[in-house]
Amino acid sequence: MAEIVFEHVTKRFGSVVALNDFNLRIADKEFVTLVGPSGCGKSTTLNILAGLEDPSEGLVYIDGQVVNDMPSGKRDIAMVFQSYALYPHMTVRENIGFGLKVRGMPKAEIDRRVQEAAQILGIEALLDRRPRALSGGQRQRVALGRAITREPKAFLLDEPLSNLDAKLRTQMRADLKLLFTRLGGTVLYVTHDQAEAMTLSDRVVVMKDGVIQQEGEPLKLYNDPDNLFVAGFLGNPAMNFFTCTPTYQGDRLTLSTGSIVWPLALPPEYGKVLSQAGQQVIVGIRPEDVTVGLPGQLPDESSVPCVVEVVEHMGSLNIIYTSVEGTRIVATTESDFVARSGDLARLALNARKLHLFDPTTTRRLRAA
Amino acid sequence: MGTNYRLRRQLSTILLYTIIGIVLVIIAFPVYWLISTSVKPGIETATFPPVYVPSSISFENYEAVLRGENLKFFINSVIISLSSTFLTTLMGSMAAYALAKSYLAFWLRRSLMLWILVTRIFPPITTIIPYYVIIKGMGLNDTHIAVIVTYVAYGLPFVIWLMLGFFQDLPADIERAAIVDGCSMWQRFRQVVLPLTLPGLAVTAIFAFIYAWNEFLYASILTSVQAKTLPVMIATFMSDQYLRWGEMSAMGSMMIIPVMIFSAATQKYLVRGLTFGAVKG
């Protein structure tokens, strides 16, 4: 297993910059996930590391060695593709063993490793089938088998779960976590699914337009996002955003939206930052930090009136879409909270969980 | 309503089968005419009105054409057709693969593709005399090589154009997986790409074979004795003094057998090949 380093890597396709001065160090045996919307450069990063694309600038290291000019096959990495990319004309056994055969490994050793991988993945019974006779989940396992049997320096996984149905995806997510914990390999995982990023990784790298937006442990990114994009990308349902004007009520620093003055007190340290940010700020708050109550359930002095627009019953919780004078705010509640569309309710924000963003730079405004 | 629907369905089935029957007759009649002429008594071959069912059957035409040097011409045809088919398919698919996988500027790719097609644009007859002079100058006149080289040159554009489509339809990830698995370009081509494009290869091979097997113009100019092929030999049954329909038909009937065997052997891939790429799946 190995350490992987990207040093000032830029990739251009004609005039399009897919990756812009990308720097990342992945420690030995670390599970790092690149997450971001389509076209953010995450797959390009993976392809560059795999040797399927050449960087326009910058250096890529595997185990301390620059690999820019090293052919893909010599880099000793294994890759799992979104489409699985199994060889349709080979059996599962041949698919899994192909990389070893190409490297000239003795047949007995190939058989042993294929058997071992099949056992780990629970696909021993499928070894003599061809890919077209397998279900999506089974193909996924074969693709993983092909990777792990190589015992490579690093595993690269390109949206490996995105072709599976929702239930299987959740199950495979857990299986993947278990598998790589057991194998203890260096993993670079690419996904656009923030849930996968949050649950699988030691560290998450959020990307947009070829630039790293923020990197860190999943919960750190979730609780302490650096900018509007990261805040909005992680979390489901997504963080609420609305524009506010900082307002002083006497000595108390608070926020107002239109005619609503939010009944909360920001820490006085925000005063200096907010005065620099200009007239308005974007407030972000996660749905779980918004409390919704029917009239009488929340004290009037700490809540504002709202109208319930939609109630989604998820089973374990409810997602409530409310409107506060035209501003939509989403909240999650216990599943036993009873409300219907059109109900009048009250809503309170947890002042300690507010995130403030500069509307121009979209950066987080932190208390000085 | 139900009866009406059933009746309509039966009628459309009958109509369908009738159309299929007519088409089959149109396709099969020349073959029937060829075979029946080859076994007809000589007097019935050119009468009017035509004799559709021979009054008696005899194989003397077959005996006649199987005598003498004719076997040699058959062997020539087999050697030339198989060699040129093999070379055309191999070289054409390699060229197509290179074209499909290389990063060329759009105009360059376009120009190359058009240029490849150039040999098919003008009628072969327009170049036949200078071509003959060149071949003779190289000392290759009346050799297998001369004919094979010619057929390969003429077959390549077709193979390249057809195979290019197959290679472009191949999912890119499969090849990328092979690259990561450590395959060299040749290993990738041989172990992953070729097996997956077998249907395409089968189609191109059949067309290349049929072309080489039936080609007359170049063979008639470039060969005289040693490398003479069957179509050229068949033409010798025709002269200003005689027209030997029976022997010509016997030879023609035998000539279609290898093509049928070749097609039957590759038929499994043929249907897949002809429809491959029509629907992504």
Image: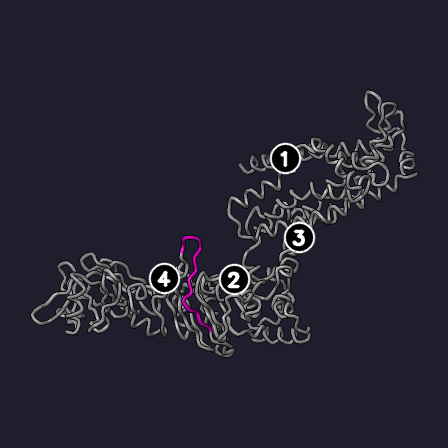
Dots 4 and 2 on the same chain? yes
Nearer to us in this view, A315 or B227: B227
Give the labeled residue for mark 1: B121
Q: Where, by quadrant of the figure, is residue A8 drawn? A: bottom left
Dominant SS type (magenta) = strand
Element at label 1: helix
Foreground tag (3 vs 1):
1
Q: Which mark is residue A52?
A: 2
Q: Which mark is residue A110?
A: none
* Residue A8 belongs to the span the image colors magenta: yes
Mark 4 or 2, nearer chain start: 2
Residue kind at label 3, given as amino acid type: Leu
Residue kind at label 4, given as amino acid type: Lys
Alpha-carbon span between mark 4 and mark 2: 21 Å
Task: Give x and y (percent) for residue A173.
Answer: 46, 70
Element at label 3: helix
Task: Give x and y (percent) for residue B24.
Answer: 71, 35
Give yes or no for contact between labels 1 and 2 (Cβ–Cβ under 8 Å): no
